[in-house]
Image: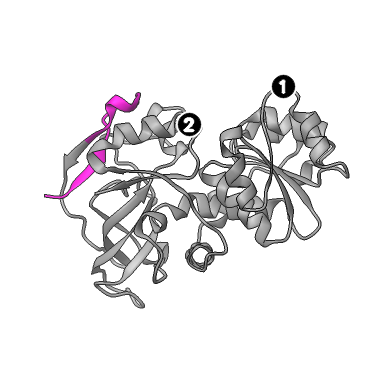
Amino acid sequence: MPRAVRFDAYGDRDVLYVAEVEVPRAGPDHVVVAVRAAGINPGEASIRKGMMEARFPATFPSGEGSDFAGVVTEVGSGVTGFAVGDEVLGWADTRSSHAEFVTTPVDHVTRKPVGLPWEVAGALYVVGTTAYAAVRAVGAGPDDTVVVSAAAGGVGSVVVQLLGVRGARVIGIASEANHGWLRSVGVTPVAYGDGLADRIREAAPDGVDAFIDLFGEAYVRLAVDLGVAPARIETIIAFQAAAEVGARADGSATAASAGVLAEIADLVASGRISVPIAAIYPLEQVRDAYARLEERHTRGKIVLVP
């Protein structure tokens, strides 16, 4: 029988286990995919801990995961455009991609570009659509100077490159260990910590036009202090602070479409942006994978492989 990650109660990483499950079947307008790779994301850890129960309550036993890439093994009635054997990437809304097989609506998948590695394809949905939504929210374009917090993380590493594709000048807040990588993709790095505002002003003597926060509310406040208009401040995590100052809080849901995912996948496959893979873990080491993720100092994505 195939295996899938499960948890039976909210808690720390030790509630996660791998169980044998039934092979999912393809209902009408759905496909079943044999998963080759599935990214993990901070939001999944928050859901597992019960921190997001009010917005995303779990039903136990709960599965986990949204991102995946793999090979279609079954198509349901009404499915057109995809067939058994097709290589795809996509997402599941049912917390079920950390598994050997996943089923999802056919409009949640797109074809995997030739040459795109499985581990990258399987990690693209959340970071890709979140980054797309964040960049779109601040309306970044040529001649804009945009500051990004957590600039070398899973989402941040895509955000800074999408901004570059749009012609913006990017200042990335990150630990000094990540400054070399940021420079390699055209980003001006600054270290976080005491004196950050002064370092940003020095890096942007003509001012900051937009700010994308990927870490927490202190950066929303910082953006205001730097004189950024609230309409051009975006956060994916500090919702209360955003509401208080009038900032944007667009997330992946606002860009969740196969078309957006295909656009991101093509940018990666063509080499215009890269998605660093920090680590790859087998499914049975899911606890170790989340331990690495929750350090919050990882550059790029962590991926599970069945």
Residue 3 among magenta residues: yes
- Number of numbered discs: 2
The furthest residue to the bottom: 81
Pointer 1 residue: 194
Dot 1: within a 10 Å radius of its alpha carbon, few (fewer than 14), some, or many (20 or more) residues? few
Asked where in the image residue 31 lies, by quadrant, the reply is bottom left
The reply, left or right, for residue 282 in relation to residue 203 is left
* Earlier sequence position, callout 2 versus callout 1: 2
Instruction: Specify the label residue 54 is tagged with.
Output: 2
Residue 117 among magenta residues: no
Q: Is residue 151 above or below residue 15?
A: below
| SS at badge 2 | loop
Q: Amino acid at mark 2?
A: Ala
Residue at horizontal 59%, vertical 55%?
A: 132
Pick the front one: 19 or 240: 19
Q: Position of residue 105 (x, y in %)?
A: 36, 62
Pick the front one: 233 or 31: 233
The reply, left or right, for residue 298 in relation to residue 14 is right
| SS at badge 1 | loop
Pick the front one: 164 or 3: 164
Q: Amino acid at mark 1?
A: Asp
**How far apart are the two marked residues, 2 and 1, measured between alpha carbons?**
34 Å
Q: Position of residue 215 (x, y in %)?
A: 60, 34
The reply, left or right, for residue 294 in relation to residue 213 is left
Q: Which residues are magenta?
A: 1-17
Residue 35 appears in the rendering: yes
